[in-house]
Amino acid sequence: MSFEWPWQYNFPPFFTLQPNVDTRQKQLAAWCSLTLSYCRHRKLYTLDVMEAQESSVFNNKKIERKLSMEAIQVVFEELRKKGNLEWMDKNKTRCLIMWRRPEEWGKLIYQWVSRNGMINSVFTLYELANGDDTESEEFHGLEDWMLLRSLQALQTEGKAELISMDDGKGVKFF
Amino acid sequence: MDRFVWTNGLLEMNETLVIQQRGVRLYDGDEKAKLDVGIVLLSTHRLIWRDLKNHECCMAIPLSQVIVFEEQAAGIGKSAKIVIHLYPVSPNKEPGPYQLSKFPYIKLSFKEHGQIEFYRRLTEEMAQKRWERTPASQPVPTTTGSQAGRTRAVGIVGIERKLEEKRKETDKNISEAFEDLSQLMVKAKEMVELSRSIASKIKDKQGDITEDETIRFKSYLLSMGIANPVTRETHGSGTHYHMQLAKQLGDMLLAPLEERGGMMALTEVYCLVNRARGMELLSPEDLVNACKMFDPLKLPLRLRIFDSGVMVVQLQSHSEEEMIASALDNVSEKGSLTSEEFAKLLGLSVLLAKERLLLAEKMGHLCRDDSVEGLRFYPNLF
């Protein structure tokens, strides 16, 4: 399935940070949704800013437009404010990108668990993310850090409890 | 040459000028004298030579010193000359350019001819010996009194000293002149202070002083050529001059503004106005101040300052919405436009075209694409 670009992607002004405040807000919103949907499509969980600039999201070769470094930083900052992005270092060169927030992931997992009547059972984290049973689920292949956060989110809601096991971590759902 | 004495070049009481000839060089015997070409004058009493440029450099020999003289014809590359043999130097001689000379004769070299006539007149004078009949009143020294001794310099040194004195005098004159100026400036400062203090007093005692007195004070200040700072601050308006100027500008700018679609850059206005005024040119500051008067004077013009700092004069009727709408229409029609293209389309200056586009952008009707190809404006589809 190929990624469907939004109409803005072929609109040259999309690649220039707009000085008009209202226009800029709309532009940034479009950028945020494009970035997230692209990452979701490619199942990307981390982004390197330098690499991102060269990726096709921020670099439209067809119309020869490229989002500048500063503009990318502005977009990322906007994503951070919305809780979809976390910087991995102080220099802001790499970031975690959460096209679903941990709570949303947790909800999905919990739904799957309850759907299958496995509340009160114990799972290893590996089982959840990479087991055969979850293959058709969206959270299949979720990176460890993301999975852990999602479960932690569930734990604060009182729907799960993380358990330390011999060879890693496990979780029990309530 | 040592027979010459310095002189001021003026003729004595009984002396009369016989003939003068330009372009004469002096020879000390057979050697060229270290002097430029000058004018030689023959009077009834003396033979006088004066430097062409420096009239202070003037010297003379009494005709009584002449023994005999002879002509020397011109040759190839040589001017005609008159050789004048002289008596030995008298012991009480006045100072001259040469202290000592080994030649008992001098030569006058005529670079610009005239030697024939000069020779004839010299012959006449030598025959008549008029200097014996009417002796010149007194041999006048170059300068008078005690100063004479000091200034009597000899030779090139003397000339240089005279030049130096002249230079000093000029220096003195200049510094005196500037002293006056700086004093004037000090005074001007005082005047400004005074006017300020008066103005502040008027301000403080608004109630105590009658209207008449206030006006009289203000007219004093104006007549001193110092604009009253208070008027500007308190009333927010400029001088009478600027108001008059604004009215005049209002009259003359209406037609050109209508021609140009209701808006002109201030620089353009400046050129237009000054071309019309010819000699009585306006300063840019006065123009701006006058333009600021448009609004308070209720003239149909406005001075508009764009966010970028560009100033334009526009007709009051010139509607902003219309301007923005037309910009949007044009851009939509073409898909996208640079300010240059827009300027060409409307026949405006690029600067003004850009301002319009920026204004439309500010209002959210357009958005920009800033790439290596330049700044383009698109309809705002966001």
Image: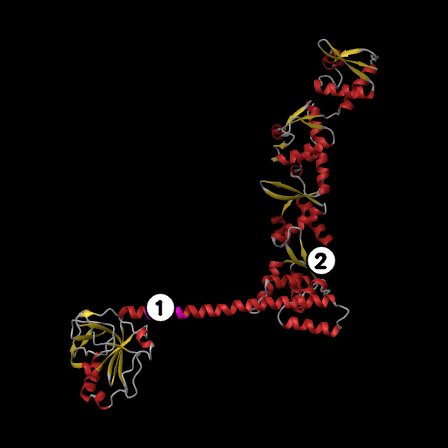
Q: Position of residue B84 (x, y in %)?
A: 17, 78
Query: Are there few (<14), some (14-19), or many (20+) residues within 10 Å of tag 1?
Result: few
Name which residue lies at 29% across and 70% down.
B158
Residue B179 located left or right of residue B380:
left
Q: Position of residue B250 (x, y in %)?
A: 67, 66
In the rendered image, which quarter contains the N terminus of chain B? Answer: bottom left
Residue in front for this viewpoint, A120 or B136: B136
Q: Which numbered tag is attached to residue B164?
A: 1
- Quick check: is B168 in the magenta stretch? yes
Q: Position of residue A88 (x, y in %)?
A: 66, 26
Query: Are there few (<14), some (14-19), or many (20+) residues within 10 Å of tag 2?
Result: some
Image: magenta residue range: B161-169
Q: Quadrant of residue B41?
A: bottom left
Residue in front for this viewpoint, A128 or B143: B143
Q: Which numbered tag is attached to residue B371?
A: none
Residue B252 located left or right of residue B70:
right
Secondary element type, mark 2: loop
In the rendered image, which quarter contains the C terminus of chain B? Answer: top right
- First reached walking from the N terminus: tag 2 or tag 1: 1
Q: Quadrant of residue B93?
A: bottom left
Secondary element type, mark 1: helix
Q: Which numbered tag is attached to residue B318?
A: 2
**Mark 1: amino acid:** Glu
Q: Is residue A3 visible?
A: no
How many marks on residues? 2
Name which residue lies at 22% across and 91% down.
B133
The vertical placement of B348 against A69, above or below, is below
Q: Is residue B308 visible?
A: yes
How many angstroms separate mark 2 from mark 1 (CA)? 70 Å
Residue in front for this viewpoint, A3 or B147: B147
Q: Chain of mark 2?
A: B
Q: Residue furthest top?
A: A166
